[in-house]
Image: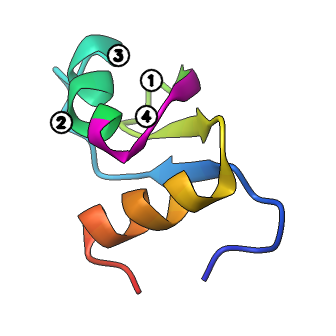
Amino acid sequence: ERPPGCKTVFVGGLPENATEEIIKEVFDQCGEIVAIRKSKKNFCHIRFSEEFMVDKALYLSGVS
């Protein structure tokens, strides 16, 4: 469950070849992406412009 005011999601388990463009393509359907911070360790943080978009991203990943 997302904390109130949270506009960022953690995405783990990314394949090594996942680029920012691929991540954006997958998560664009959730809403406007403000920033993607990609780590070299197969995870990233995605910041959306609105809180409800985080809920969409969580639904997309199967987390409830």
Q: Amino acid at mark 3?
A: Glu
Quarter of the image for the N terminus: give it.
Answer: bottom right
Task: Identify the secondary structure beneath mark 3.
Answer: helix
Crowdedness of circle 3 by 10 Å Cα count: few (<14), some, many (20+)? some
Q: Is residue 40 left or right of residue 15?
A: right
**Tag 4, which secondary structure?**
loop
Between the C-alphas of marks 4 and 1, the distance is 4 Å
Compared to residue 25, the image places residue 64 above or below, namely below
Under mark 1, the amino acid is: Lys
Q: Mark 2 is on which residue type?
A: Pro
* N-term mark: 2 or 4: 2
> Is residue 27 rendered to the left or right of residue 58?
left
Residue 15: give x, y in percent of width and height.
18, 36
Given the current orientation, which residue lies at the most extreme right position?
Answer: 5
Residue 15 shows which numbered tag?
2
Q: Residue at 16% across / 20% down in the picture?
A: 17
Q: Residue at x 44, y 23 (%)?
A: 40
Mark sitting on residue 41: 4
Give the mark nearer the N terminus: 1 vs 3. 3
Mark nearer the viewer, 2 or 4: 2
Name the mark nearer the viewer: 2 or 3. 3
Q: Residues within 10 Å of mark 1 (few under 14, many from 20)?
A: few
CB within 8 Å, label 4 to label 1: yes
Mark 2 or mark 1: name the one nearer the start of the chain.
2
Q: Which residue, given by chain and number where applicable, does mark 1 sit on? A: 40
Residue 20's disc number: 3
- The C terminus lies in which quarter of the figure? bottom left
User: Any magenta on residue 34?
Assistant: yes
Tell me the magenta residue range. Answer: 29-35
**As shown in the figure, which amino acid type bears the numbered disc 4?**
Lys
Q: CA distance from mark 4 to mark 3?
A: 14 Å
